[in-house]
Image: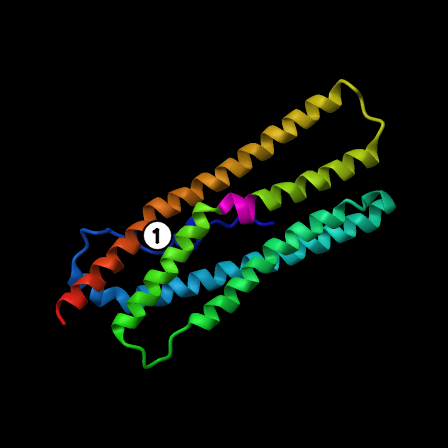
Amino acid sequence: MNWNDYEAVWKRQELPVGADADVKVLLGTFEAKSRKLHATIRARDLAEAGAGLVVAAAYALTWRQVGTQGWPLAFGIALILGVAGFFISERFRARRVRLGVDATLLAKIEADIAELRHQCALLRSLWTWYLLPCAGAIAIQVGVLIRRSRPLDPIREPLFLLGLGAFFALVFWFAWAINRRALRMRLAPRLEELEKLRREILAER
């Protein structure tokens, strides 16, 4: 699976100010930022889904090359396809909640608030639906390849596995850390901005 993260998805947008943002500025920039928000989420979903399908195909090719000993890769393929399927389901969800062109400004703001809350929830549960399945698939692949290459040196093998485990632990920790940073620096403050804008609009009614 590719390691595109939410920080990369939102990196082209200015850092939101948060609850201290000026309401007039929020009104003036809402439409443009809303379009960019949905466009970047769509790009992320499509890129991750496509990457998952490619990785699943690569696992299937490895299985074919390894032969019958590669049967555990079926579980790895299932995990990767599960992650890819999740991003595909996100596209269908986005289509279901999409507003029409005649939607009011308040309705659009509330829709973006709901979307941001959803994205924040995804980031908070990243290990459950993304990182752990990917880690499981990688562990299965490594196990199959090591099993195929036996016998290995009884001294070097534990050291190799330890180093490999440390490497992937660092990779997954980094993926988690940068996504948490995106949540803290981008999504949560933008959510505060839109909630403030909604309150101001409701107060003027």
Say which residue appears at 38% left-offset and 61% top-offset. Answer: 115
Name the quadrant containing residue 137: top right
- Residue 98: within the magenta? no
Q: Position of residue 51 (x, y in %)?
A: 61, 56
Is residue 165 found left or right of 152 in the rendered image?
left
Q: Position of residue 56 (x, y in %)?
A: 69, 54
Q: Is residue 152 above or below residue 183?
A: above
Q: Position of residue 189 (x, y in %)?
A: 28, 50
* Residue at the bottom extreme, as displayed: 102
Label 1's element? Answer: helix
Say which residue appears at 49% left-offset and 67% top-offset. Answer: 93
Is residue 43 found left or right of 117 in the rendered image?
right
Main SS, magenta region, reads helix
Assess disc 1: are there few (<14), some (14-19) or many (≥20) residues with their C-alpha within 10 Å of its C-alpha.
many
* Residue at the left extreme, as displayed: 204
Quarter of the image containing the C terminus? bottom left
Q: Is residue 96 above or below residue 63?
A: below
* Residue identified by numbered label 1: 187
Color theme of the render: rainbow
Q: Which residues are magenta?
A: 126-131
- Name the residue nearer the viewer: 131 or 167: 131
- Residue 129: within the magenta? yes
Name the quadrant containing residue 40: bottom left
Say which residue appears at 42% left-offset and 70% top-offset. Answer: 97
Q: Is residue 114 above or below residue 101?
A: above
Instruction: Please state the total of marks drawn on the protein image.
Output: 1
Type of the residue with mark 1 = Leu
Is residue 43 found left or right of 116 in the rendered image?
right
